[in-house]
Amino acid sequence: MDLVRFSAPANLDDVDGSEDFHERWHDLVSALIKESTKVSGRGAYVNPALRAVRRDHERTLTWTGLSRPLLMQHRDNRRAAYEQSENRDKQIEYLEWHVTRVEGRISRVTFTTETPEYWKLLAALHRDVVWDLYKRYVSPDVAFVDLFPDLSTYDPRNRWNTTDGIMHYIMRINSLGDLLGVSQEYEPTHHADDGYDALPYSRATGADARINMDIWAMSRQGLHVATANRPGLYMIGWDDSGWTKPDGSPVDNYWTVDRGLKGATVRLSYEVPDTEGFLVGDIRIGDRPIEFGSQIAEHITMAAHVICGDPS
């Protein structure tokens, strides 16, 4: 068993192998994890960069991308949940998105799971890389001063990551730090029977409940649990079963992985090719037209990956 050197999310290499960036990224991630934290039972959540962990098991912790609290609050008015979920500050399941419209109808929805920690470090060391990536993925119209108003300090809530586009998380509890912080939380006095019961700190998110419940279950077995290397938050699946075109026929594959790996996607878009002659807003899900990006987010499977093993 060897100690881990943390790689960038989805093994991204935006800096052409820059050792300085990758070393700093490893140090940043490691600083977010204690060497060993008692979370439940005889086991622990550990830092695999400081304590070697056996890979007896690999677990994928999953949830869906649409806000569980809003779905619970509006259980009898799903449209209200969809509408409120369009506010980036309500997108709390580690999935955020931006909607592009043409004459009021949705033409494209872009989803991201990229963390602010990655982009702030990248901006501190490689400002031109950040600018180039924004121009490539968001808009060729992005100006350097839009991202660095004083020509030095990165503004994560710039217009191209808020009103006019999306690059990474801005919602305050969406971050790698929050993912790893939740992973190190101690189980309350009662054992969680399922994901809905695992709400020790009155957070009703589907993501945190899922992460807590699974990590506690493994730790209660006496296992050491750790983040899998490529630490991050990922989109691992999307399901358009039953979605229909305007003529009632099944939709084709309109998904594009923009950044990331298979099973570790960090940027995903949904857009109908011009040759089809209609827009995303003309597609129906369950006989309901797509009016909001949140209707698509509900069909995206999110994940965090962990490993665990017997400490003996």
Image (cartoon, rainbow, N blue to C red):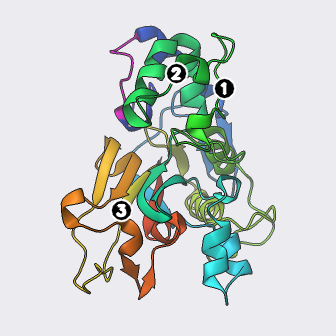
Q: In the rendered view, would you say 161 is above or below 81?
A: above
Local SS, label 3: strand
154 on left or right of 131: right
Q: Residue at x 50, y 46 (%)?
A: 113
The three-letter amino acid code for the residue at tag 1 is Asp
Residue 57 is labelled as none
Q: Amino acid at mark 2?
A: Ala
Give the residue at x 69% y 12%: 150
**Mark 3 or mark 2, which has the lower sequence index?**
2
Q: Position of residue 99 (x, y in %)?
A: 50, 56
Q: Quadrant of residue 200?
A: bottom right
State which region is magenta: 11-18
How far apart, in angstroms, are the residues tagged by discs 1 and 2? 13 Å
Does residue 94 sit above or below 169 in this rendering? below
Question: In which image quadrant can residue 201 be found?
Answer: bottom right
Question: Which image quarter: residue 197?
Answer: bottom right
**What type is the residue that disc 3 sits on?**
Gly
Q: What numbered label is drawn on residue 155?
A: 1
Res 17 seen here: yes
Q: Reply above or below: 145 against 219.
A: above
Q: Nearer the viewer, mark 3 or mark 1?
A: 1
Location of residue 295 in the rendering, given as x and y in whole percent from the top left corner = 50, 72
Name the residue tied to disc 3. 237
Q: Which residue is mark 2?
A: 143
Q: Position of residue 79 (x, y in %)?
A: 61, 80
